[in-house]
Image (spheres, helix red, strand yellow):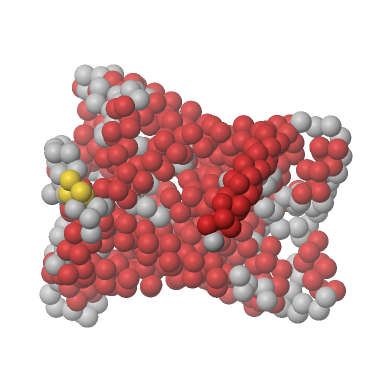
Amino acid sequence: MGKLKLRPFRRKRKINRTAGGAVLNVIIIAIFGIFMVLPLVYAIMQAFKPLDEIFIFPPRFFVRNPTLDNFTDLFILMSESWVPFTRYVFNTFFITIVGTVGHVIIASMAAYVLEKHKFPGSRLFFNLVVTSLMFAAAVTAIPNYLIMSKIGFLDTYLALIVPAFGYSLGLFLMKQFMETIPNSLLESARMDGAGEFHTFWKIAMPMVKPAWLTLVIFSFQILWGELGSTFIYSEQLKTLPYALNQILLGGFARAGAGAAATLLIMIVPIILFMVAESNVIQTMATSGIKE
Amino acid sequence: MATVIEKNKPKIKDRLTSRLTNLGREIGRNKVSYAFLAPYAVIFITFTLLPVIISLYLSFTYYNILEPPKFIAFQNYIKLFLGDDIFIQAVKNTFILAVITGPIGYFASLMFAWIINEFPAKVRALLILIFYAPSISGNVYMIWTIMFSGDTYGYANSTLIKLGIINEPLQWLTDPNYMMGVIIVVVLWMSLGTGFLAFVAGLQGIDTAQYEAGIVDGIKNRWQELWYITLPNMKSMLMFGAVMSITQSFAIGDVTQHLAGMPSTDYAVHTVINHLVDYGSIRFEMGYASAIATILFITMIGSNKLVQHLLRKVGQ
């Protein structure tokens, strides 16, 4: 088990690199970076614009007189809703966190045995999961609804959380990354008498940390944006994006509050993203996958 | 002859039972593996596999949700190919979009992941955020409706008018001459998604000692390094990215619906998914919608086979 060597941190030697190439990289990243980040900047700008600037002609990208009016408008609107707004916030956090944690663990366990144990049916099952990614979700909604109602999941958190545990995406991602773990490493853990769960949790999972951190981002993002309106009809179980959508439907007068809402709902995934990504980079700066 | 068959019968039976007992023993030996797989398998089968199988069956029926499905064999498929001009148009548009945005999006994801990986660790997380930004919030692409709105308010129009390139506003999202171009730009802009992040994570996992060993083996520049060391080490992520590219580029629908409307002018950017949603969620012809989904499904499986075949050549 002592075979997992962590490489001591040291400066990565720049090999096969020319100064010209580095400059070119910076230029490419700068040009495309501006193009990519525009919407994010725009969302921030809109949220701080007073109403007259939102509707000005010709349209202006940058805000002239930044104001917090949109946010106060939004909070007033929120306090008027008959289900306390914190309830929507709680629902979305609850569904997102439970769904993500469950999905990462359950899909990783399955991916681990599909990649590292060969047993009857393992290939077939994996192929089914990958193939299922290619079937349009729009037509499975009806069968899904029927199944939900048969097992009594309708109008409960379970309708959103449990299917999330079984997303195809996570299993596929984890299985692909598990391929990079050397078998000899797991073998030596077993020789040392480690149980299968211990080998999975203490040896395999830390080695694919970038993979499951990435999966956390994907899963969080999907569940965070969940409207849930198909399977849930009780108002107090509805999610935050659903409630904010209702505000946006208020029309022109609410354009400012809507812009503030759009920004607020983006901030949480972005913070998580930054934390997760810098962890992905940090872990691998100090260790590579080595036998 | 009859006696020969008689003689063989018990043999076949024996072989079958011995095979079954063997399988039983195999399953018994692997019970830990099955236990690990079980929670995922139960949920996947219930909420993903079963609905897909039901939809495949529905594609052979007439089903309007209110009445029970009525079996009509291949009629949906016959109607799709022989009696539905809009479907043929949708297939054409979908292929144009998939063939252009799929490969370009895939290579752009790989290229940007690779370039970003060259930057110092502290800058990297920020750059990844910037490039991933278009995928982070579900419908940020709506800002393109402002960029390309058909009046003089739109950024594209007001800029072009100011520069004197055009005199009157162009109808970016309703004139069939421009719609496809605008949609392609927006889809490409959003294509650094799941595949891109998987590549970023994959690049982090490559042991740097391999690059040092590469120099000894005579690798001279960063392109050789990419082809002989980096890419072969990332094969499993490349496969993942390819599947994601295929599923996303063939399933374009939300973007066209929200930017160009439904239906779009002259069906200029009407995709197979738009057609499916039209029949499934608006006309409630679920049997027909399921047939469309099945055809899309088969197309994606075919493209996937082709791409996996090409990917096997990496690093050779």
Residue B58 in the image, given as x and y percentages of width and height: 26, 48
The answer to whether one can see residue B24 in this image is yes
Going 21% across and 22% down the picture, which residue do you hit?
A80
Q: Quadrant of residue B179?
A: bottom left
Residue A225 in the image, given as x and y percentages of width and height: 36, 39
Residue A133 in the image, given as x and y percentages of width and height: 43, 51
**A131 above or below B175?**
above
> Where's the N terminus of chain A, which quadrant?
top right
Going 20% across and 58% down the picture, which residue do you hit?
B76
Residue B198 in the image, given as x and y percentages of width and height: 56, 54
Q: Nearer the viewer, residue A84 or B298?
A: B298
Q: Nearer the viewer, residue B313 or B58?
A: B58
Q: Nearer the viewer, residue A211 or B179?
A: A211
**B41 above or below B265?**
above
Q: Quadrant of residue A92?
A: top left
Going 60% across and 65% down the picture, which residue do you hit?
B114
Residue B168 placement, left or right of A99: left
Residue B175 placement, left or right of B244: left
Q: Nearer the viewer, residue B235 or B108?
A: B235
Residue B312 placement, left or right of B85: right
Label count reads 0
Q: Quadrant of residue B94?
A: bottom left
The answer to whether one can see residue B109 in this image is no
**B252 above or below B228?**
above
Residue B307 placement, left or right of A155: right
